[in-house]
Image: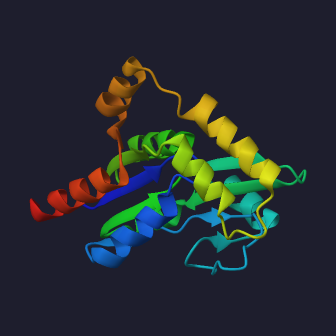
Amino acid sequence: MPTLTIIMGPTFSGKTTLLKNILTNNKDFQQLITNTTRPKRANEKNGIDYYFVSNQQYTADKQNDIAVAPRTYHVQSGDYWHYYINANRLKELKHNTLMITDLQGYYDTFDYLKAHPEIKIKLQGFILSTNLMTIFKRVVSSDRNDENPRETLRRLYDDEFNVFNFNDLDIQKLKDKYNVQIKSPREILNTLTEDNING
C-alpha cells in the first residue's frame, strides 16, 4: 500500500526545499502535484510546482467532486487563490508520494480517504518545526521578487498564531488521531529514510 506523506508548516518554513531534497535523494518517492488558481511565479513550472488552472476549472472540479481539500485564500491584492488536490490523482496513486498542503488540507484529505475506503493509501503528516528567526531571515533574503511583503507577513502571522500554535494536548491528538508529527527537517528526512529501509 503506498504512503502519502504530507508536509506542512508556516510560510517560509522550508517545505518546498525539504520536499525537493527528499525527491532528489530518495527515488522511492514521487510528488503529488496540487492544483492552484494563483498566478505562476517566474521560476515555477506548470506540472512541476503546481498545475495552474483557471477559476472556471476550479469551479467545475468542485461541482464534479474532483476538488479534494479545497483551500481558498483572500490575498492582499483582493484576489482569491484556490488550491486543491485532484481526486483522480489520489485514486491513481501507486508509489510512496509526497505533497505540501496546510493543516486543514491534511484534515480534509484524511476525511476524504476515510469516506473512500476503496482508495488504499496510508496517510501520514509532518509539520516542520522551524524557528521564527530562521523564517524571518528567509523572508528578508527571499528571491521571490513577485512576493508582496504585506501578504507574506499576513500569512506568517496567521500561520504562527492561528494555525500552528499547539499545546501538548493538540500535539498528542495530532499524533494519535491523525498520524501527524512535529519534527525538524533533519528528523523528517531520517524518519522517511528509516521507514523505507525497514519496509
Image quarter hosting the N terminus:
bottom left
x and y percentages locating residue 191 in the rendered image? 22, 53
* Residue 117 makes an appearance in the image: no
x and y percentages locating residue 167 in the rendered image? 44, 20
Q: Closest to the observer: 166 or 179?
A: 166
x and y percentages locating residue 179 in the rendered image? 32, 39
Q: Residue at x 53, y 52 (%)?
A: 101
In the rendered structure, the answer to whether residue 28 lies left or right of residue 197 reads: right
Residue 59 vertical position relative to residue 116 in the rendered view, above or below: below
Q: Closest to the observer: 58 or 29?
A: 29
Residue 68 vertical position relative to residue 179 in the rendered view, above or below: below
**How many labels, in total?**
0
In the rendered structure, the answer to whether residue 15 lies left or right of residue 158 reads: left
Q: Residue at x 43, y 47 (%)?
A: 128
Q: Quadrant of residue 86?
A: bottom right
Image quarter hosting the C terminus:
bottom left
Q: Residue at x 51, y 46 (%)?
A: 9
In the rendered structure, the answer to whether residue 188 lies left or right of residue 18 reads: left
Q: Residue furthest right?
A: 78
x and y percentages locating residue 26 in the rendered image? 27, 74
Residue 145 vertical position relative to residue 83 in the rendered view, above or below: below
Residue 112 vertical position relative to residue 82 in the rendered view, above or below: above
Q: Residue at x 61, y 39 (%)?
A: 159
Q: Closest to the observer: 199 or 127?
A: 127
* Residue 199 makes an appearance in the image: yes
Rendered image coloring scheme? rainbow
